[in-house]
Image (cartoon, helix red, strand yellow):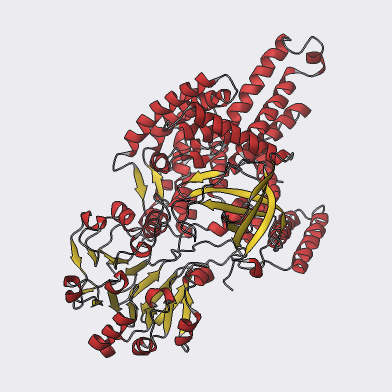
Amino acid sequence: MRLSILTFAAGIGWLQLQPALPDIAALAVMAVAGVLLLALSLRLRAATPVAAFLLGIAWAGALAHHRLADFLPAGSEGRDTEVVGVIASLPQYYENGLRFDFDVEHSGLPAPRRISLAWHRGFRPQEDGEVHAAPPLHAGERWRFTVRLKRPHGNLNPHGFDYEAMLFERGIRATGYVRPKHEFARLDEFVMRPSHAIERLRERIRERFLRVLPDQPYAGILVALAIGDQRAIDASLWQVFARTGVTHLMSISGLHVTMVAGLAAWIVSWNWRRRFLFGGRLPLLLPAQKAAAIAGFAAAFAYCLLAGFAVPAQRTLTMLGVVALALATGRATAPSRVLALALLIVLLLDPWAVLSPGFWLSFGAVGLLFYIGSGRLGEIRPLAAWGRAQWAMTLGLVPALLALFQQFSLVSPIANAVAIPMVSFVATPLALLGAIPLLDPLLWLAHQAMAALMWLLEWLAASGWAVWQQHAPPVWTVALALGGAAWLLMPRGFPVRWVGLAAFLPMLLVPPPRPMAGEANVTVLDVGQGLAVHVQTAGHDLLYDTGPAFSPDANSGNRIIVPYLRASGVRRLDGLVVTHADKDHSGGAASVLESVPTGWLMTSLPGDHPLLAATPPRRPCADGDAWEWDGVRFQLLHPTALQFAQPIRKTNDMSCVLKVTSRHGTALLTSDIEAISEAALLARHGDDLHAEVLVAPHHGSRTSSTPEFVAGVGAREVIFPVGYRNRFGHPKEEVVARYAGTRCWRTDADGALTVRLTGAGVAVAPARAERRRYWHSGVE
């Protein structure tokens, strides 16, 4: 059975890696073949895993087709439409407004059943220049809004987060925002549906926590521990948790669910045996052990409902259910069988769970505990067992953490030794009890416990050696390290266990490939409506612009560029060019400079710009500056020194223009120059502007890419760095038409674009083609 469940899971995992779904007919054939093989397995056991693999593909494929059928038609994108429906999730407040899931009941234009809506305010004014504050919105209310929708679409970069996969797993098939200038109205204060009732209860608990603990720094942690709302935790705290390796504790983890189940089981068992609360006859009809098992499962189920059924909670609840059923029926069940059944049920309910890092870490952690606990002889003291579990979790999860996040905490064993008992047995029980009305003092006690713990965690996180960070390891090195971990964690007495450590070395030491001398890679990152370009030679790295700021706390630097550089093995930037002051080019610069050591900063920013207070040596980028790295020439073509002395009105025409020339091809990076600067470049440099690859000026605006400039550059490949359905309409159709005969790329349709200037010629690799999955949307 266990092997069949694993192959069923493998079939589901295989399907989630496909660029396109098998059609319904092919899935039906697989399902029929799987059933026939199951029948054959009565005589031929080897057929069972093959049948399970085919059934896994058929099951996941059928559900995927059903979800894809619920989509937003292209004709409904970008158009105002009236929708009536129910707020289906806790409204989440952020700097720009609030965001919530919305179950659509009626709509003026065709729309999916579940959408994600935002009510913007403050950070970006509406078209009429006014700031529209949202009315009080609560889960379970029925509203009528006028909204503007678009298909799910996210930035796609090498090693980057797949936002579209996250939305697809949640069943959200369109995103959009409320148009507050139009009429809106609350139609019903509460819609009586079980899922909405749970969301309303979660919201009331959150509001009560924040009311009892106003302006307290760790109130959001208690909210997360009680109802699973992790977005209540401040972003700065997540950095502390990541650096100390306790992130898993700040959500409804399996440990918390088990603790609640165990507490409920103990209370029922204690009262059942003493007949205090249940009378004299009931304990005679149902033994205390079975009653406790049922009560523990019921408490865990209620807690998981309150927590939103995250993958760790699903896994733990399923395992507890299997154990409770075994106790109730008097059947013993092996731990590995329990884990396998939990895996099966989780994937039957949610085949997209395999897309979540939490799925792999959750099942991996429990599998490790079962692995080190099986086949061991002799009695082990509790303290020694605790130490062995900490050692196994720290070592065994390193390959997964490096593969998923490119980092792991070196102080994790110390932090978890204190944090696990403090969070699981002090803060979480107090937070859950404090959720009961009239028990407000318990919330203050829970907050004081978290304050004491955070003092230690912040001290540990502040050390420079708290975290090991590195490049994304190749898949084969991760598999080798997992085998090494299994070898190293063998029972005591197993020969040469230390050899397992050697299997970790390739994962840590094999560097990512870099260009050869005289070659260069130019990666235009997908940062939405903005620009960020990474230029890499054999031994040097340059960042040209840093993309936009999304909010006061989120920008392209900390969300996209820094994770990309780390995963690519870039520990240090030799240079950073910030071409001009526009926010869509400089918005992420501060985060990059804070996170990545940088050799120098070259820019055309005005002297009073805040970025110039950064520590790297800085110099203006002026026509005539040039340098060479590893046989690749870098040449500044614009602006001129005279323009710094006599600044022009438009910052776009102060943009730094950089030409990158390898032995095998040239790329011209033009930032936001407009027609006047293009004419000046042609006058000063003429034939020297020729390049095989051109990053289109000003995102394909009408004010740039004059026919003379396009002809003067003569590029074979042109890249438009644009955001999906951006409000400027870039690139303009007439501008794209000027590049007739040139192969055109755009980051909203192709994702990040890596240009390789190598001996094999000039090649462009689009991230969306290389990482294509069946749920990814296109650009029409």
For the residue pair 595 and 197, the one nearer the viewer reads as 197
- Establish if 143 lies above or below 174: above
* 652 left or right of 370 in image: left
Indicate the position of residue 172 as horizontal and vertical percent values: 63, 55
Residue name at image x 39 percent, y 31 percent: 454
Residue name at image x 78 percent, y 55 percent: 44
Residue name at image x 45 percent, y 68 percent: 752
Based on the displayed image, in which of its 4 quarters is residue 7 positioned?
Answer: bottom right
Indicate the position of residue 46 as horizontal and vertical percent values: 73, 56
Q: Quadrant of the C terminus?
A: bottom right
Residue 491: tell me if it is visible.
Answer: no
For the residue pair 307 and 355, the one nearer the viewer reads as 307
* 765 left or right of 151 in image: left
* 568 left or right of 737 in image: left
Based on the displayed image, in which of its 4 quarters is residue 241 positioned?
Answer: top left
- Establish if 341 lies above or below 513: above
Indicate the position of residue 508 as horizontal and vertical percent values: 37, 53
Indicate the position of residue 455 as horizontal and vertical percent values: 35, 30
Residue 77: tell me if it is visible.
Answer: yes
For the residue pair 215 and 771, the one nearer the viewer reads as 215
Q: How many marks?
A: 0
For the residue pair 408 and 717, the one nearer the viewer reads as 717
- Establish if 622 lies above or below 280: below
